Amino acid sequence: FKEIYSGSVRKFSITRNVVCTKCEGRGTREGGVLKTCSTCNGSGYQVKMSYLGPSIVQQVQSVCSECRGNGEIISPKDRCKECNAQKVIRQKKIIEVHVDKGIPDGKKIIFYGEGDQSPGMKPGNVIIIIDEQKHPVFQRKSDVHLSMTMEILLSEALCGMSKIITTLDNRKLYIHTLPGEVIKHSDLRCIEQEGLPHYKNPTEKGNLIIMFDVKFPDPGSLLPEKVEKLEKLLPPKESVIVPEDAIVVTMSEFEREHVDADEANEQEDAHHHHHHPTVGCHPQ
């Protein structure tokens, strides 16, 4: 993931077939003789017929065992010693893959003509596919934006907080809120120009989107006297008039996992029917 942010150069070793330079792909020594395979008549394959029963015939096509699919026979004394009449040899080569900043996930980098060679045929290509790996902090959004979840305490959400964000290139970003600048659970903030570089235009960057995860005190952790003091500091509670015919019920804890699967399916359906909106920053 950091390589997509900063760019990099990777070196890979590939092994491929190349046309034998000694015999120039003929498979014979200089002056050697090629003969058409008499077993397959130069086709490179054999057809065998098998009778499985009355009026039932099975036809099986296989590579010619005599010429190994070449359609030609080279006597041992005429074979090229470099490729042993195979016409190609195995060769290792180092290729350099330039991972540009902001390159999209799944992008294909093609090295034309660097694949296997065969006499009389156009060489194949080597195709490198970018496979973006997950990052423990940042997620990619809309190609150029980065998002992260920041956990803060309830006291920080109400009374102000200070945090340091370490970027993908190891810079330190200082963010803070003022006392009374309330941050609610799942609130979003963004920092402009701190997302991913634009592909092919790396001087421009997307935004860094921060979603706040406000942690409330654990059940039973607040003593009654502290609750009383806290209640005096917070806005007054809404008074409720309980009707005489109201039924008193008890609430119990409910596991979020029970509904996560249904919500995930709904989001997947929505993803296929709508385009992602552009994420922008709005002045506070």
Image (spheres, rainbow, N blue to C red):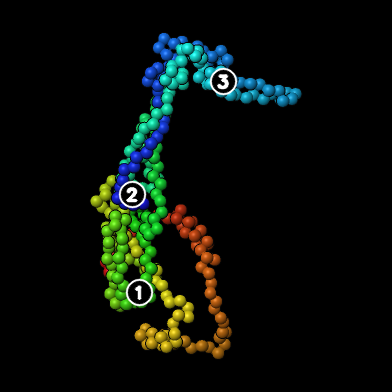
Name the mark nearer the viewer: 2 or 1: 2
Of residue 42 and residue 137, the one placed in the foreground of this image is 137
Q: CA distance from mark 2 to mark 3?
A: 49 Å
Residue wearing tag 2: 3
Residue ID for mark 1: 157
Could one spot residue 120 in this view of the protein? no
Instruction: Describe the element under mark 1 as helix, strand or loop.
Output: helix
> Residue flagged by tag 1: what amino acid is it?
Ala
Q: Amino acid at mark 3?
A: Cys
Residue 88 position by quadrant: top left
Residue under the point 56% across and 23% down: 63
- The residue indicated by pointer 3 is 64
Q: What residue is shown at x 31% (from left), y 46% (from top)? A: 8
Q: Residues within 10 Å of mark 2 (few under 14, many from 20)?
A: some
Q: Position of residue 159 (x, y in %)?
A: 32, 77
Question: What is the count of numbered marks?
Answer: 3
Q: Secondary structure at mark 3?
A: loop
Q: Give the vertical position of 240 relative to 119 (above or below).
A: below
**What percent of the width, then of the height, locates residue 221?**
45, 80
